Amino acid sequence: MGRKRKPDYLKKGNLILRLPNPVIWELEKKGNASREAERMILDLVKVNMDDYITEEEK
């Protein structure tokens, strides 16, 4: 059995550009969408995780 290919929608570039964010669309036109978007997403995830952790500890 061969390895399964990742579906297109799971690939990093497509996943990021699929997000409905006009800022990301603007970056896409300039050609550096994935790097900037990845940074934005990681920041958002970090914040959400911090909120989650504090809620769990209370």
Image (cartoon, rainbow, N blue to C red):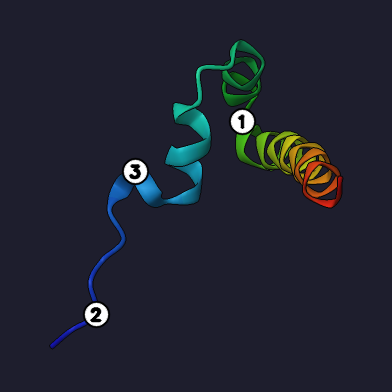
Q: Are marks 2 and 1 in contact (CB under 8 Å)?
A: no
Q: Closer to us: mark 2 or mark 1?
A: 2
- Of the residues shown, which amino acid type is indicated by label 2? Arg
Please report the residue visible at 67 percent of the width from the left and 15 percent of the height from the top. 23
State the separation of the CA atoms marked 2 and 1: 31 Å
| Mark 2 Cα-neighbour bin, 10 Å: few <14, some 14–19, many ≥20 | few
Q: Earlier in the sequence, mark 1 or mark 3?
A: 3
Mark before the other along the chain sequence, 2 or 1: 2
Residue 26 figure quarter: top right
Query: In percent of the image, x 43 and y 39: which residue is there?
Result: 14
Q: Which residue is mark 3?
A: 9
Left-right relation of 15 to 28: left
Task: Classify residue 8 as left or right of residue 54.
Answer: left
| Rendered view: 7 above or below 35 | below
Q: Earlier in the sequence, mark 3 or mark 2?
A: 2
What residue occupies the far bottom of the structure in this picture? Answer: 1
Quarter-of-image position of residue 48: top right
Write the residue at 17% across / 84% down. Answer: 2
Circle 2 SS class: loop
Residue topped by disc 2: 3
The amino acid on which the numbered mark 3 sits, given as a three-letter code, is Tyr
Q: CA distance from mark 1 to mark 3?
A: 19 Å
Tell me what residue is drawn at x 24 percent, y 79 percent. 3
The location of residue 6, given as percent across then percent down, is 31, 61
Residue, disc 1:
31
Which label is found at residue 7? none
The kind of secondary structure element at disc 3 is helix
Image location of residue 58, percent across then percent down: 86, 45
